Structures are given as structure tokens and as C-alpha cells.
Amino acid sequence: MRKDKKQVIGEEISDDSIKLFLAVEPADATPPSLHKLVKAYRGLRVDDFERFVGFFVAEGYDLSAADAQGNDFVALIQDQRNAEPYIEVIKAVRG
């Protein structure tokens, strides 16, 4: 880690910082909603991801967006070791 970078563990992330994940856009044919979910999953702890999903839904993005192969967010991450809590967040919001 660079000397000018402070390691942040356990500190609260601001809503504005979480909302930055809503601004990321895909560079390929991936649906924007799916791209935003994947980026947030990769960059946020599960508690922060849960907050992100609230903002995501409020902005009208689609939790069921799928790629060209028909894979939605859950299908893309379900085989990853730490995915289960993130999947639970999506399932809870979907109802």
C-alpha cells in the first residue's frame, strides 16, 4: 500500500460515495443496471451494498437485468465464495 493511502477498515462510507457506483457505465454491451450491480458488489462491503441497492432501486434501475447469455446478477456471482450475503440482499429486495 502506498504511504499516502490510509487503509480504511470498518469506517462508514458516505451515501455520496456509495452513489458513485450508480454513475459507472459499461464499456461493452452489458446492460447498465447489471454493470452497476457487479461493480458495487466488487467494491462494497455487504452492508454498504445493501444501502447501494436501495439507491439503485430508487433510481429506477433493474435488479433483474441480464447479459446476452441470460445471466442476471445472482447467476453471475452465485459460484463466488463470498456471494451469499449479497445474493440475500437482492432476494430480500425482490421479495
Image (cartoon, rainbow, N blue to C red):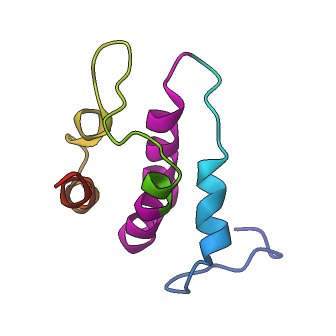
Question: What range is drawn magenta here?
Answer: 29-54
2 magenta-colored:
no
Q: Is residue 18 left or right of residue 63?
A: right
Front residue of 49 and 65: 65
- Main SS of residues in magenta: helix
42 magenta-colored:
yes
Question: Where is residue 27 shown, x and y percent of the image?
Answer: 65, 23
Q: Quadrant of the N terminus?
A: bottom right
| Residue located at (48% from left, 37% from top) | 33
Residue that extends furthest to the bottom in the rendered view of this protein? 11
| Residue located at (67% from left, 47% from top) | 23
Residue 19 against residue 42 in the figure, above or below: below
Q: Quadrant of the C terminus?
A: bottom left
Residue that extends furthest to the right in the rendered view of this protein? 4
Give the mark count: 0
Question: Where is residue 38 shown, x and y percent of the image?
Answer: 44, 42
Residue 88 against residue 70 in the figure, above or below: below
| Residue located at (37% from left, 67% from top) | 50
| Residue located at (53% from left, 52% from top) | 59
Question: Where is residue 65 shown, x and y percent of the image?
Answer: 37, 31
Question: Where is residue 19 shown, x and y percent of the image?
Answer: 61, 61
Front residue of 33 and 82: 33
Residue 47 against residue 57 in the figure, above or below: below
Front residue of 78 and 36: 36
